[in-house]
Each structure stands twice: as structure tokens, then as C-alpha cells.
Image (spheres, rainbow, N blue to C red):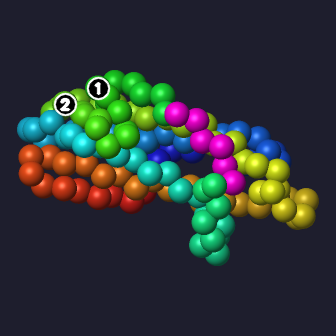
Amino acid sequence: MRLSQQIAIQREAFAAALELTNTSGLEARDIRVVLSAATPGGELVTAAFGITDPELTGGLSGVDGAGTLPAGSSGEAAWTLIPSTELGGQDPSGLQYLVKANLFYKIGNVEFEVET
């Protein structure tokens, strides 16, 4: 997963993108991506972020569990994450949050799960 921001200003939205390349000889199908955000201590705070619907490019048709990616092709899903006011904290330097993606898909009859 690629995040477009290295530093943050309080309540500033940021972009997250997941690039996929299918090097298998078969179509990847049933593609689903689940984003999550947590504090460095592991507390999940995903619900405190507004997350836009993904923008899809390349051969990727979706990330909602029905997506496909043809053999030999690449695609990307990109989201914007918007922190709520409760995520600012009291520290003048701000707080850090860890964002990850869980990717689920099938190639042939084999199911895969990958965590970024």
C-alpha cells in the first residue's frame, strides 16, 4: 500500500493506493480489499476515518468481493482517508496512525489472503 503523505497537518485527508499485478496465467477473481487504521499500540480506529469509495484504474474491475484482474495485467485502487476531529489528540506534533489493507482473492480454485 502506498500512502501519499509523509507528514500530516491535523485533519488533513490523505490518499492510500494499492497496486496489483497479476503475473499468473489465470484471471484473479473475487477480489476484496479491507482497509483498517490503528494506533501504534494496535487500537483499531478505522471507524473514525471517512473513507471514499475506491477509484479503480488499469485492469482492476473492483475491490468489493466481485472484482477481477485479468492474467498478465495490472491495476490500482485508490482511496482518500479523512480523519475525524477525535483523531487529533492533544500532542502539538499530532498522532501517527497505521493504515493497512487486507487483500482477498482467488486464482483458479485457490483462495489467497495478503496483508500489507
Q: Is residue 40 above or below residue 20?
A: below
- For label 1, the residue is 59
Residue 99 in view of the camera = yes
Q: Which amino acid is tagged 1?
A: Gly
Q: Residues within 10 Å of mark 1 (few under 14, many from 20)?
A: some
At x 35%, y 51%, the residue is 103
Spatial CA span between label 2 and label 1:
7 Å
Q: Secondary structure at mark 2?
A: loop
State which tag comes first along the sequence, 2 or 1.
1
| Residue 35 drawn in magenta | no
Among the 4 quarters of the image, the one containing residue 45: bottom right
- For label 2, the residue is 70
Q: Residues within 10 Å of mark 2 (few under 14, many from 20)?
A: some
The x, y position of residue 6, in whole percent, is 67, 47
Q: Which mark is residue 84?
A: none
Q: Residue furthest top?
A: 58
| Residue 51 drawn in magenta | yes
Q: Nearer the viewer, residue 113 or 4?
A: 113
Q: Are marks 2 and 1 in contact (CB under 8 Å)?
A: yes
Q: Quadrant of the C terminus?
A: bottom left
The x, y position of residue 54, in whole percent, is 49, 33
The x, y position of residue 91, in whole percent, is 88, 64
At x 82%, y 51%, the residue is 85
At x 60%, y 66%, the residue is 44
The x, y position of residue 63, in whole percent, is 37, 39
The residues colored magenta run 48-53
Q: Nearer the viewer, residue 108 or 17?
A: 108
